[in-house]
Image (spheres, rainbow, N blue to C red):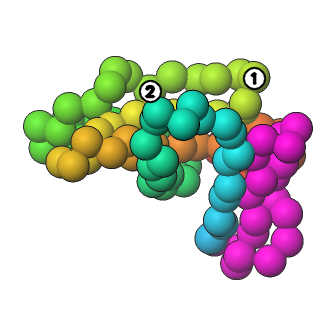
Amino acid sequence: MQPAFARKDKVLILKVTDASFFGFVSGELPTSQPRIATMTLVSSDVDGWSQRLAQLGVETKGPPIFKPEFGIYILYVTDPDGHTVEVLEMRAPNWPHAAR
């Protein structure tokens, strides 16, 4: 594995193969908060995911948004167990598979 993306000791994404990545996000949570994980699906078509999920009646936490400080375009969805699922399009210029 080799680093594909890093941001200020907070985010590290490793390239496993040409089409797969594994990421870590560090952060401090208050001891009163449960430790949870978020599933992130990296895609080049967040808008397509948004439309398809809407067609299926899946509620999202809002429309996709662009976060320029991170170089990502992201859609947040809640799974049936209440966990957050992210559909993420990497638009950072140094990302190996930037959206076109």
Magenta span contains residue 45? no
The picture quadrant where one finds residue 7 is: top right
Residue at the spot x=38%, y=41% of the render?
Answer: 84
Give residue 31's position: percent from left, percent from top.
54, 37
- Left or right placement of residue 98 versus residue 58 in this view: right
> As shown in the figure, which amino acid type bears the numbered disc 2?
Pro
Q: Which residue is mark 2?
A: 64
Q: Is residue 19 above or below residue 77?
A: below
Residue at the spot x=34%, y=21% of the render?
Answer: 62
* Disc 2 versus disc 1: nearer the observer: 1
Q: Main SS of the magenta segment? A: strand
Give residue 66's position: percent from left, percent from top.
59, 23
Q: CA distance from mark 2 to mark 1?
A: 15 Å
Q: Is residue 92 above or below residue 62?
A: below
Magenta span contains residue 18? yes
Give residue 45's position: percent from left, percent from top.
48, 45
Residue 19: image tag: none
Residue at the spot x=71%, y=22% of the render?
Answer: 68
Q: Secondary structure at mark 1?
A: loop
Q: Residues within 10 Å of mark 2 (few under 14, many from 20)?
A: some
- Left or right placement of residue 82 versus residue 5 in this view: left
- What segment carries the magenta color? 1-19
Q: Which residue is mark 1?
A: 69
**Quadrant of the rendering where the C terminus is positioned:** top right
In the foreground, 74 or 46: 74
The picture quadrant where one finds residue 29 is: top right
Visible residue check, residue 62: yes
- Left or right placement of residue 42 versus residue 60 in this view: right
Q: Name which of mark 2 and mark 1 comes first in the sequence.
A: 2
Residue at the spot x=57%, y=31% of the render?
Answer: 30
